[in-house]
Image (tube, helix red, strand yellow):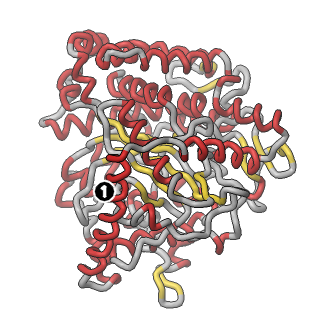
Amino acid sequence: MTSQSECLRALNSKQSILTGIQRGIEKEGLRVAYNNGSLSQRVHPKALGSALTHSQITTDYSEALLELVTTIHPDVHQLLKELKDIHAYVAQNIPDEIIWNQSMPGQLPAEHDIPVGWYGTSNSGMLKHVYRLGLAERYGKHMQCIAGIHYNFSVPDALWELLGTPGNNLQEQRSIGYLALIRNFMRYAWLLMYLFGASPAIDRSFLAGRPHQLQALNNNTLYLPYATSLRMSDIGYQNKAQSDLQLCYNDLDTFVARIYNAVTTPWPDYEAIGTHRDGKWIQLNTNILQIENEYYSSIRPKRVTERGERPATALVRRGVEYVEVRCLDVDPFTSTGISQDTACFLDAFLLFCAIEDSPDFPDGGFCRESHENFGTVVQRGREPGLILHNEEQPKTLQAWGAQILAGIEPYAEILDRAYGENIYQQALAQQQAKIENPTLTPSARVLKELQESGLGFQEYTLQQSQRHHKQLIHHALDATTQHEFKQSVKQSFIDKQALEDGDTESFDSYVKRFHEALDIRAYSDNQDL
C-alpha cells in the first residue's frame, strides 16, 4: 500500500480527483407545537407527501420525527443549499408547528401517547411500522425520539488506485479501503464528540425515574458539567443484547458474519415478548436484532440496496459503496442542524481517515480503547487535563486533538486547492480554536446560555427553534424549486398507492420472504455463516 507521504504527493499533482467526493445528509428533528414545544400528535402532514415514498421528506421512528434527506452532491455548497431548501419547504407547510432543533427531546408525553410512524397498508409500509413497534418494545419510545445528523461520504474510485489499496478488483479495493477508513474513524471519533457535541443537558422528564448520575442545573434540567454529547452516552441506547455485540471492522466477511448472527440468533428477553399480541404483529422477530439497521453504531459501511434486498446481502454481493457517519448531534445554533464548517471538516477528517495508516484492530477486531475514549469524551470531554488512551501512550485530549488536527491540515489544503476555495482550511482553523479554548465548543456554549438565561432545557430549546423557524419561513424558494417539491409530494402519493394496489400476498408471507432474503451464505466465503 502506498505510504501516506507518497499519497499526499500524488494527490497534490492529481488534486482534481477529490472533486469526485460525494456527500449527503440525513437530518432528524421532531415536529412540536410552536407555542409550547409539546410533541406533535398530528399525522405526517399531507403537504409533505407520503413518508413511505417521498425521497427527501420522511419520518424515522415516530410519526412526529421528521427525517430530511438530501441527494448526494460533489460540492458542500450545493449540499447545504438543498438541505436548507428542504427545511424551508417543511417549515412553510407545518402550520402551528416547528422542528425541534436539538438532538435530545424536550418534555415528552406518556409512552402510549408517542405516535409510532405509520406508512400505510402496503406490505413494505407495514414492515417499517412493525419494525418500529419492535423498537418500542425493546428500547422504549422515549429513546426513539432522540435525533441526529447522518453524514454519508464516498471517495472517487481513482483514490483507491492512487493509494495502492490491495484487492483483486475494484469492489474488493473499495471494501478494504472503506473498512480502513472506519477503523481510523473509530480511533478518532472521540474528537468529533468534543468538537461538535451539543447535548450536555437534557429535560429531567427524559429519564422518567431511571437511575442516573446527572446533576441538576435547575428544576427541570439535568446535565454534566463537562459533557459534550449526552445523546451518545449511556443514557441513550442502553441494551444488553446490543452491548454484547462486538462488530469487527478488520474485514468485510467477519463484519457481515457478526451482523448475520445477530439478526438470526434469538434473544431470551425478546422471545418472552413474542412477535404478536392480541393477534397483531409487535416485532418482526425475536432475534438480537430485528434487521441490520437496528444495530446502533457511530459509523456504518453502506451499499445502496435493490428492491427487496437486505443490507447485509448487498454488502456481500457488491461490497461497500460509502460510509454513513451517525454520531453527530444536531447543531442547535444553525437552522438546518449542521454548518458549512462542520461539513467541510468532516470531509477533511474522513479523507484523513481513508489515507492514514490504519492497522487492524486486535482482539478479534474490537478496539476497547477506542470505545472507552469515546465514552469518556461524551461525558467528560471538556474536563481540564482529561487523559485519553492512545496506542502509543496516554495523552491529554488537547495534545492528542492538536496532533490529529495537524495531521488533517494537508488534506484541508489539498481540498481547498481542488475546489478553488478556502473553506476547508477555514473549517480546520475553527476546530483548532476549540482545542485551544473549550468554551468555544457547542456543548460549552449551550451550557453557558442555559445558565445565563435561567431557562430550563425545554424553554431554551423552544426559543432557539422558534428563531430558526422564522428564518426558514422567510427563506425564499424559487419557483422551480417550489414546483419540484409539489410534484414530489404528488408523485409520492401515487407511488404509495401503487404499492398498496400491487400487493398480492399476505403480510405474514411478506415477512417470511423478507427474512429469507437474508441468506447470504452463497455469496460469502466466511465459514461462520
Q: Residue at x 77, y 31 (%)?
A: 448
Q: In this view, does 469 lie to the left or right of 486?
A: right
Question: In percent of the image, x 55 and y 52: which residue is there?
Answer: 29
Q: In which quarter of the image is residue 322?
A: top left
**Residue occupying the far bottom of the picture:** 279
Percent position (x, y) of residue 94?
54, 59
Measuring from the top left, give residue 117's x and y in whole percent. Answer: 49, 68
Q: What residue type is labelled 1?
A: Pro
Which residue: 54% across, 38% down? 371
The one nearer the camera, 142 or 74, is 74
x, y percentage for residue 511? Answer: 33, 76
Q: Viewed as shown, does residue 361 lie left or right of 441?
A: left
Reading the image, the residue beneath label 1 is 311
Nearer the observer, 513 or 489? 489
Nearest the viewer among 289 and 364 is 289
Residue extending farthest to the left is: 169
